[in-house]
Amino acid sequence: MSELQTATVPGDSAYQYASPLFIAWQLNSECNLNCLHCCEEAGTSFPDQLNKDQMLNICRQFAEAEIPYVALSGGEPLLCPHFWDVCGFLRSRGIDVKIETNGEMIDPATAVRLARLKLRSVQISLDGASQKAHEALRERGDWRKVINACKLLRAQEGVNTEIVFVPTSFNIHEVGAAIDLAASLNAHGFYTGKLMRIGRAARNWEKLCPTDKQYQDFFEVLDKKKEQYKGRMKVYCYPYDVIEELRYRLTTPSASLLVLPNGKVKLIGPLPFICGDLRVMSLAEVWEKYKQSWRDPRVLEFGRSVVAQPALVAKANDWIEL
Amino acid sequence: MDMPFTAHVKWRSEKFGAVVFDTLNEKVFVTNGIGGSILKMLADDLPESAISKRLREEYADADGDRIESEVSAFLDELRTRGLFASDARSGR
Ligand SMILES: C[S@@+](CC[C@H](N)C(=O)[O-])C[C@H]1O[C@@H](n2cnc3c(N)ncnc32)[C@H](O)[C@@H]1O
């Protein structure tokens, strides 16, 4: 009668839902770093970035549509002047929020403020167990500030800190040590997955892409560490690379939207298609357009070409409006 | 709204019933209309016995004992999946 049927993959089959289950929102494109692998090519602000009223209007629609979960990213979201307003609003409406940050702006006062928001998690990018590897990849970055941010969050009650590590030829050999470091910082989880060939990572691909042998060693270390930290810290590796994910999504779009700093909505990271604009369309309209767009022949054809020729994913940031 | 659930479990009604999202573990569960009604009653803080009673009234033609065991199995499933905040409901 009332059996709880499990959906096999989170967000399976967008078509069945009245509104998205998850929103990935890039609040800004401004960033204090210049990461060699940045999939967003973050750096300077968009000229048409959303203002505070527009952001809060979008938040209101998320609440009305009962969106359960929003991830706030960037650029560097802590540089967005409306970050606290957005976060505060979403939390006041019971929406779970994850923030994705490089951690460098987290000082003692910010750690307290973040803890008060009772976020789902604070995700911090740590691309090396050593200062050298992290800073080689994250140009202008300061590894010590990141470690300090993790310590400040650890001192707060109830903050789930998640460490994200992106493997490249610069740092892949440090994954085991990075997991140990995350555990010593009482991280809630350690997350990783293959480098995506998008944005600056595509431009720097030859320099950054790990070899097959490096990936093989990386996965072996992850398996061991998963066992070692079982019950203490989640060690998770996203099982699909960007192309495998895309192949799957072409038939089963996820129940999620990717909102850009100017309010435009992208179908999915590795495709260039824009399916709506939250400055001029309602969330409900964008959601309908999103679902239709996955059946648009232009999307299917281009998506299949990307699957056949993965290098095409490098065009992901050359937007095409549907 | 999310009273009996852990802090990071959200649910909402859908045409087909309801969707439950454990955001911390990024796991999504779906259930049918009756599952959705049970979730609504849980959110209204109704004890298990009251939930079964309401459903018996609503489905007067159905076998009452079966309704009770279904409700109990559904709650067990939520519990096993770690969606409840505590075992406070196990005694009710
Ligand atoms: C684009 S960043 C934005 C948030 C923040 N500025 C930061 O550095 O974490 C969001 C996440 O994407 C990851 N990321 C960036 N480029 C990537 C790529 N090419 N492949 C996989 N992950 C990537 C980052 O490491 C980070 O965890």
Image (cartoon, coloured by chain):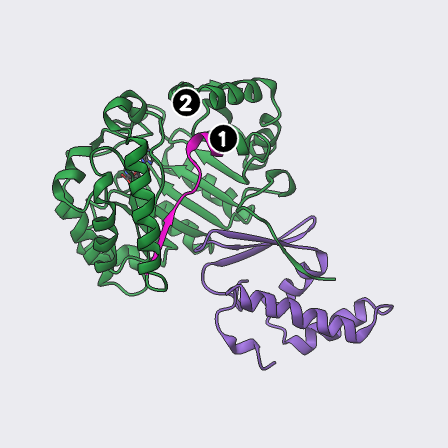
Chain colours: A green, B purple
- The crowd level at tag 2 (other Cα within 10 Å; few <14, some 14-19, many 20+) is many
Q: CA distance from mark 2 to mark 1?
A: 10 Å
Left or right: A138 as drawn, with respect to A233? left
Q: Mark 2 = which residue? A: A313
Q: Are marks 2 and 1 in contact (CB under 8 Å)?
A: yes
Quick one: SS at disc 1? helix
Q: A220 or A249: nearer the eye?
A: A220
Image coords of residue A281 (percent x, y): 54, 30
Q: Is residue A113 magenta?
A: no
Q: Is residue B34 above or below residue A16?
A: below
How many marks do you count on the picture? 2
**Precedes in sequence: disc 2 or disc 1:** 1
Q: Residue furthest right?
A: B61
The quarter of the image that holds ligand 1 is top left
Quick one: SS at disc 2? helix
Please provide the residue range marked out in magenta: A233-245
Left or right: A46 as drawn, with respect to B86? left
Q: Mark 1 = which residue? A: A246
Left or right: B67 as drawn, with respect to A177? right
